[in-house]
Amino acid sequence: MAINVFGESTGIEALAKRLLGSKASDIVFVESKDSTERYRVSVDGDKIRIEGSNPSAMAVGLNRYLREVCHTDVSWFAADSIVVPATLPLPEEVLEGESKVPMRFFLNYCTYGYTMPYWQWNDWERFIDWMALQGVNMPLAIAGQEAVWQRVWRSFGLDDQTIRSYFSGPAHLPWHRMLNLDRWDGPLPQSYIDAQAVLQKNIVSRMSELGMSPVLPAFAGHVPPELGNIYPDVKIHPMSRWGGLDPDKYRSYFIEPSEPLFDTIQQRFMTEQRAAYGTAHIYGLDPFNEIEVPSWEEDYLRSSSKRIFESLVANDPNAIWVQMAWMFHYMSDKWTDSRIKAFLSGVSPYRMVLLDYYCDYNPLWEKTDSFHGTDFIWCYLGNFGGNSFLAGDMDTCMTRIDEVYNADLPNHVGVGGTLEGLDVNRHMHSYILDRAWEHTGLSNRPEDWISLWALNRGGLDDPAIIDAWKNLYRDIYHSVSASQGSLINARPGLEGSGNWTTKNKINYDNDALWAIWETLIEADSQNPAHLYDVVNVGRQVLGNHFVLLRDMFTEAYNQRDIPKMKKIAGLMNDYIKDYDSLLATSPDFLLGNWLNHARAYGTSADESDYYETNARHLITTWTQAPGGLNDYGNRDLSGLASSFYRERWRMFTDAVIKAVEENREWNGAEEPFYTDLARWEWEWCDGHESHDDQPSGNPKDIASSLLKKWRDINTRDLQ
């Protein structure tokens, strides 16, 4: 049988007040005694009555009331305003629904790097409220663990400098926590360790208040190599190279689970963590994510998972192990079905929950005999690196969720989202989490769902907005595998897209997106969500269109037409400048926000500079490994486009023009230019020039101007 996760809380009234202010007094929350997760929204005199079997159900009922009756959209970002009617309207009919699965998971280890490394409490507070409204009751909560590990490793005799050097920089901690790397961009400042510990207390407390069961970390085998100096007879494995990093400097180390010391470490960590943050008895452990296992023998895999599980339940008899199934997808050539079965067989039935991480593209439950009976959650991934690309396929996701529901599997226990970063496709994540519920009288069909979404983003003011969103759903959002970034964000070249991390393939006609953008620009609405959509669609259509300019430059190079090359190079430079000006009109697309959040963590000027450099690394060079993860976290941000991407393209076009002027061939990736470019990229990360963290300009005025200026560039006479 599947496990059931219900939290206990009295925080639903406080949630409503945070979102609605004094208007929240018009809503009465009533906890029912129903054993099934249900909500019911009705009228009680002059009040709105929201009844639910637990806080999660009541929050979902509140969200349905806000969406369907108030036509209010609540974003996951604290900076986004919430627009509600002057007087809360009474629902004209009863709104009811019930959960279809007991677990609704959200987040990814990577989200703590690509979005959250420098969040403050106000950011987390809004985001946790957003998760509650979506019915999430099982969020990943892994902040603040370095403070716990610091106390644990001290107890084994390691000094603070060794411990902090073992940790990576803040934005790269997710990959340290997943056993992929050690030390990169470290040592981790004590100020960050301390601040995250305070933040984690607030996070888990608020999650618990809202009926959630936070997924906390547990020990999965990752140890500092210096532990081997203290225990020379203990078997500690150096793990495989990851991310192109120098293995002599940055590889991670794994203690053999059969070692008694493994149990001792687990006991000390869980004791310290329980004292600091409590427990919901649900733990994330991912011992072999994207790395080679010390042995691929099935007996070893079975015994390793068995020993890890035994160490877990020895310290919490009610423990549930949550494990990413991503490793089975990522190394599918090594993780054969028989090896997967062997690994899973080491854990007691119903005590492990697998996150089927990438069901929008590759649902593994279908290929593994439903994970051989192990409980699993169907998850939507949707993006890599938090990239700013319009992507997602509601129809395919609907079909694949229906398939798992129709299979009626006793071990299918939930629906979740595993996005690598909070991206520009929030509707996709809301839609997926909505499918964990059966809302009476509300259609799950994507075309109906998207119409309500559009109505709440300015469609009340102008029905053209609804038509635009229907066209986005029909013509644009039909890609299940998100591309990585526009060509503007790619390392420059005469062809291709720079690196595997900046694929810019689109599966639609960009002319269709131009037409949608024009409709949005001309629509009669000043709804903040609509203005965001104007910028969001615009930066995508402009990003797509840049390919034409690059290809014109390449054609001019092939013709060795220097005047034409110079003219197009000037247009490319002007284009990115204009593109940056559009991004600057929205608070959601500002490099200054990202950098200033990082700097705010510093307790001195030097620390603020360090945090800023770390934040710059993640979205540009990532590390310093040639050809590795460069630009994996690329973003469409004002300031980044003008100071980094635009400058790269200017240096590139200058270098190619110079090659033609010197009557020589451009030798592509073999050009010395790219060595100089890598040095310049690294120097940019060490820079500390300021960038705006407040929007400037009118989004519709600038969008209208850019549409007229650039839409027909492909037919312009460049002679």
Image (cartoon, rainbow, N blue to C red):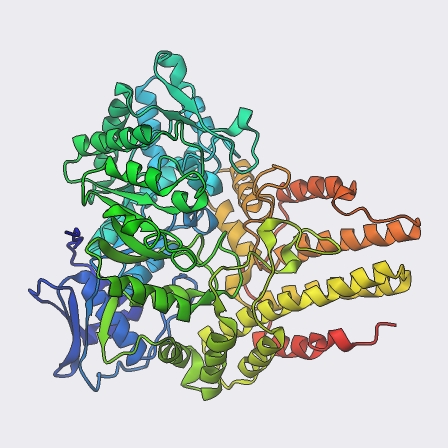
Residue 566 location, quadrant: bottom right
The answer to whether any part of residue 49 appears in the image is: no
Q: Residue at x 79, y 55 (%)?
A: 653
Residue 65 location, quadrant: bottom left
Q: Residue furthest left?
A: 33
Residue 347 location, quadrant: top left
> Considering only vertical position in the picture, is 525 above or below 576?
below
Closer to the camera in the image, 190 or 678: 678
Left or right relative to 140: residue 24: left
User: Where does residue 286 sit, x and y in percent of width and height?
Assistant: 35, 38
User: Where does residue 353 sit, x and y in percent of width and height?
Assistant: 26, 47
Q: Residue at x 23, y 74 (%)?
A: 439
Left or right relative to 270: residue 288: right
Q: Residue at x 40, y 31 (%)?
A: 293
The answer to whether any part of residue 300 appears in the image is: yes
User: Where does residue 162 sit, x and y in percent of width and height?
Assistant: 44, 22
> Considering only vertical position in the picture, is 301 above or below 705?
above
All told, the count of numbered labels is: 0
Q: Residue at x 34, y 37 (%)?
A: 339
Quarter of the image with the C terminus is bottom right
User: Where does residue 40 sit, x and y in percent of width and height?
Assistant: 16, 74
Closer to the camera in the image, 255 or 339: 339
